[in-house]
Amino acid sequence: MTKSSGTILDGDNRPEGSGAGTGPSNANDCGKLLLLQAEFDGELDAAQAAALAEHRAGCPVCTRNEALLAATQRALRGATYHRASPELLRAVAGRIGASRPPPHRRTRMPWQGLAGFGAGAALAAAILLTLLPVGGPGLVATLVDDHVRALQPGHLLDVVSTNQHTVKPWFDGRLDFAPPVKDLAAAGFPLIGGRLDYVSGRNAAVLVYSRGKHLVELFVWPAAGAATEPARATRDGYNVLHWTADGMSLTAVSDVDPAGMAEFVRDWRQTP
């Protein structure tokens, strides 16, 4: 797949037909199609992904199938989704609850206040409930898994640009809301682009910033209610910070250390 002359990046940057494949007689399947689909679903480990990437570099069949999968993924992201009704959610929750132990109390939620965030654990738990109205801390796992999956080749960016005035209008017409996009280069977090995502039943914008060799992803979607102060969770070595402001839910995910993540959030909130 080739990169267009604009700022959009779709999948890999290899030219289609860049090598000869050696697969079965079926022109649409070289024997790696299931692995290619598993890679798109984020189901391959690092070794499998590396081996597939080496194969794909010389296989025009995989290059073509990758382009089809990427086009399908973009089409699904642009589809219209409908939120489940309260009755359906209660029915599903009832069936799950019948086979699982009772959930932890709110005071045992994994969020912790930032340094200086003196409202204590009870308020941190309340913020978590604002972030996760259904599913509890499962959304933390979803966002971390999404972040890790995005780090694989071809998943990170739909629009590549360091200019906020290029990234922000790119979302126009692709989302039913206008995500805020800020230039944090002066603070040490340069913007590198963004992508569309679908998280727990809602369309989301993902803004991607860098910090040295690390990446910080900011998930953004509309949120009702008053603004909240930042609260923090960790999972598998990744730091997750959530807050709401100006009618938006904002969640930053990265392997940047807690102090660096606090700095990112502070700079974001202070930048107009």
Image (spheres, helix red, strand yellow):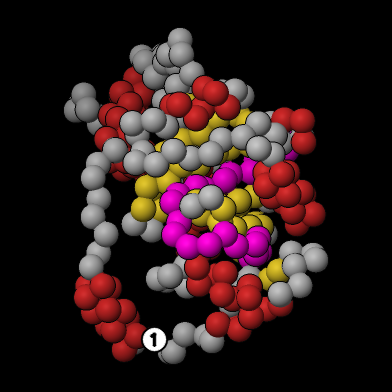
Q: Quadrant of residue 14?
A: top left
Q: Position of residue 144 (x, y in %)?
A: 54, 55
Please state if 108 lies on the left or on the right of 61 as rendered.
right
Answer few, some or many: residues within 10 Å of disc 1's Cα (few below 14, many 20 plus, some between 14 and 19). Answer: few
Residue 167: where, in percent of width, then height? 51, 27
Q: Secondary structure at mark 1?
A: loop
Residue 264 at least partly seen:
no
Residue that extends furthest to the top in the rendered view of this protein = 5
Residue 114, image x and y in percent?
74, 64
The one nearer the camera, 232 or 142, is: 232
Give whichever of 47, 67 is nearer the camera. Answer: 67
Query: Picture coordinates of residue 172 (x, y %)?
Result: 39, 30
Q: Tell me the residue that label 1 is attached to.
A: 100
- Quadrant into which the N terminus falls: top left
Based on the picture, tell me whether residue 98 belongs to the magenta stretch. Answer: no
In percent of the image, x 50 and y 47: which residue is there? Answer: 220
Q: Is residue 225 magenta?
A: yes
Q: The disc labelled 1 sits on which kind of residue?
A: Arg
Q: Indicate left or right for 80 with 156 as reference.
A: left
Query: Magenta residues: mostly which secondary structure?
Result: strand
Residue 243 position by quadrant: bottom right
Quadrant for the C terminus, please.
top right
Q: What residue range appears in magenta? A: 211-233
